[in-house]
Amino acid sequence: MAAIGENLKINSERLWDSLMEMAKIGPGVAGGNNRQTLTDEDSEGRQLFLDWCKVAGCTMGLDQMGNMFARREGTDPEALPVYVGSHLDTQPTGGKYDGVLGVLGGLEILRTMNDLDIKTKHPIVVVNWTNEEGTRFAPAMLSSGVFAGVHTQDWAYDRVDAEGKAFGDELQRIGWRGDEDVGARKMHAFFELHIEQGPILEAENKQIGIVTHGRVCPGPKWRLQAKMPIQDQLRCPCAKTQGSPWHGFWIELRQLRCPTHLMRSGRRVISMFTRIHAT
């Protein structure tokens, strides 16, 4: 058993192997992943996570939004659980680590404590939230939003994808709708290890960034479709592409949200686009 105050280390090779094994499900472009929520690939990824949790001695809870809760018991049955986790679903062109690291990193904590025979007062629960990305079913953070009381469950079930398939129907189809009431769980604390696939840290030669602020983008909301040349309209923060004109493309815009302070500045800013087409 580990000594009190000892500097503990996880098994980094095991965590890496788990990340690579999960990445085999729903392979995407450029070495990334396409494991969108409530698809067959999402179901396969969930099953792999469930299997690993069982081997680690966890019990699995599943609520009516498909949120997964892998629990390792503590020594005090009255103590509220400490939660850690994120999501296993990805963007259509997502990376291997966005969300997935937060879930499998949490699992690695439990595995390491098992290896070192560490007992905790509080139970520890590793969470996989359903549809955090919001690519297939808008908005993002849908199921955690229902858990937190931001959305109603019926409203979430009625969200549809581009093919008109409803969230509730697809959750039932893949077999990951549980019986547990959403939001009934109580928490002592919640932690999330998260990584975003972006070029800024790499460009500035930084290995890690600490979140100090949250950003809200209020403003008017439009629904429109448009065709426009991209040259001098769209810019990427990546140094390799910044300022490069792109020809022969047009963007289809839907539910565009443009922050008011950017509108006043007169800058041409595309806040969100859903499709890009080559011509």
Image (cartoon, helix red, strand yellow):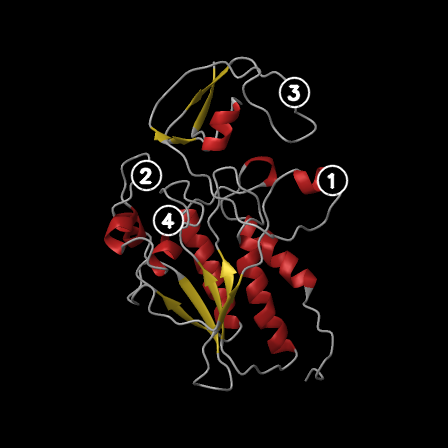
The amino acid marked with disc number 2 is Asp
Density class for disc 3 (Cα within 10 Å; few <14, some 14-19, many ≥20) is: some
User: In front of the other: label 2 or label 3?
Assistant: 3
The answer to the question of whether label 2 and label 3 lie on touching residues, with beta carbons closer than 8 A, is no
Quadrant of the image occupied by residue 178: bottom left
Density class for disc 2 (Cα within 10 Å; few <14, some 14-19, many ≥20) is: some
Assign a secondary structure to mark 3: loop
Give the alpha-carbon distance from disc 3 to disc 1, as whole Å. 18 Å
Left or right of 223, for residue 97:
right
The amino acid marked with disc number 4 is Leu
What residue sits 72% from the left and 49% below the top?
207
Left or right of 273, for residue 16:
right
Location of mark 3 (residue): 243
What residue sits 62% from the left and 81% below the top?
118
What residue sits 49% from the left and 78% below the top?
123
The answer to the question of whether label 3 and label 4 lie on touching residues, with beta carbons closer than 8 A, is no
Q: Nearer the viewer, residue 159 or 260?
A: 260
Q: Residue 204 — which label?
A: 1
Is residue 21 shown above or below 234? below
Earlier in the chain: of badge 4 and badge 2, it is 4
The amino acid marked with disc number 1 is Glu
The answer to the question of whether label 4 and label 2 lie on touching residues, with beta carbons closer than 8 A, is no
